Image (tube, grey):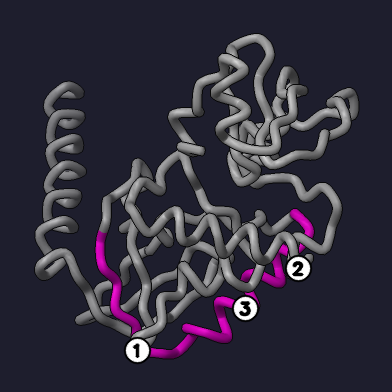
Amino acid sequence: MIHKIAHRTLLAVLLSFILLVCSLNAQTLTGKVVKVADGDTITVLQDRTQYKIRLYGIDCPESGQDFGNRAKKFVSGMVYGKQVRVVQKDIDQHRRVVGMVYVGGTCVNEEIVRAGLAWVYHRYCKDSFCQEWADLEAQARDAKIGLWSHSDPIPPWDYRQGARSTSKPKAVSGVYHGNTRSMVFHQSSCEHFNCKNCTEVFDSRETALKAGYRPCGGCNP
């Protein structure tokens, strides 16, 4: 009896997941934003159904981090109570629609990066325009806009995993950092840019390659 109930429960969960996917008309939904949870998570109401949306390709500071609330307020100002169009890219493990969010012709994902309130999430951002976003991130960092006004902001993935520790070595400067152990080099927007063994500094990609280093497969420097 218990096994039958568990089986039915599993089928119900799978069915609801399938219905969620199928309910997205041509991979796109349009509706009103009824909630902004944080800088990269919103809820959209379409035809009496609420969809939790995770903005694709970016990662904003968490609520407990510096600039977490500011990122939330920025996004709220752009989308709360407004009609948006969401172009689905994926559905994540939490059953959230991962997508590009547009207000009129403005891409919200891109504007958050431009405002210096998000990192480009290179682990998942694999489209050709992700490099353009990385350039916008670099511009915001150079101008010390938003979270980049701090000298060493903690990436949210480090914050979530508690990977940052007081014993972590001070970040070194340079356009590219090379991992002396793996012989892989990373660009400044990469989550591994200031890794423990990333102490070799290169002024250019060519210099890193000539030194025998290979480019990171995640950030594609």
- Tell whether label 1 touches label 2 (CB within 8 Å): no
Say which of 116 and 37 sits in front: 116
**Which disc is residue 25 wearing?**
none
What's the CA distance linking mark 3 and mark 2? 18 Å
**Which amino acid type corresponds to the residue marked 1 in the rendered image?**
Gly
Q: Position of residue 191 (x, y in %)?
A: 61, 37
Give the label, 2 or 1, closer to the camera: 2
Q: Which residue is mark 1?
A: 104
For the N terminus, the image quarter is top left
Q: Which residue is mark 2?
A: 143
Magenta stretch in the rendered image: 65-88
Say which of 14 and 146 sits in front: 146
**Which disc is residue 74 wearing?**
3
Q: Residues within 10 Å of mark 1 (few under 14, many from 20)?
A: few
**Which amino acid type corresponds to the residue marked 3 in the rendered image?**
Phe
Check disc 1 and report its element: helix, strand or loop. loop
Please tell me which residue is depicted at 20% across the width and 43% down the height of the picture. 13
Say which of 194 and 117 sits in front: 194
- Tell whether label 2 touches label 3 (CB within 8 Å): no
The quarter holding residue 69 reads bottom right
Please tell me which residue is depicted at 74% across the width and 68% down the height of the picture. 146
> In the drawing, does residue 78 fall left or right of residue 45?
right
The quarter holding residue 197 reads top right
**Which amino acid type corresponds to the residue marked 2 in the rendered image?**
Ala
What's the CA distance linking mark 2 and mark 1? 27 Å
Q: Position of residue 186 (x, y in %)?
A: 59, 33
Please tell me which residue is depicted at 50% across the width and 28% down the height of the picture. 216
Instruction: Tell which circle, 2 or 1, labels the residue nearer the N-terminal end.
Output: 1
Instruction: Tell which circle, 3 or 2, labels the residue nearer the N-terminal end.
Output: 3
Q: Position of residue 76 (x, y in %)?
A: 56, 80
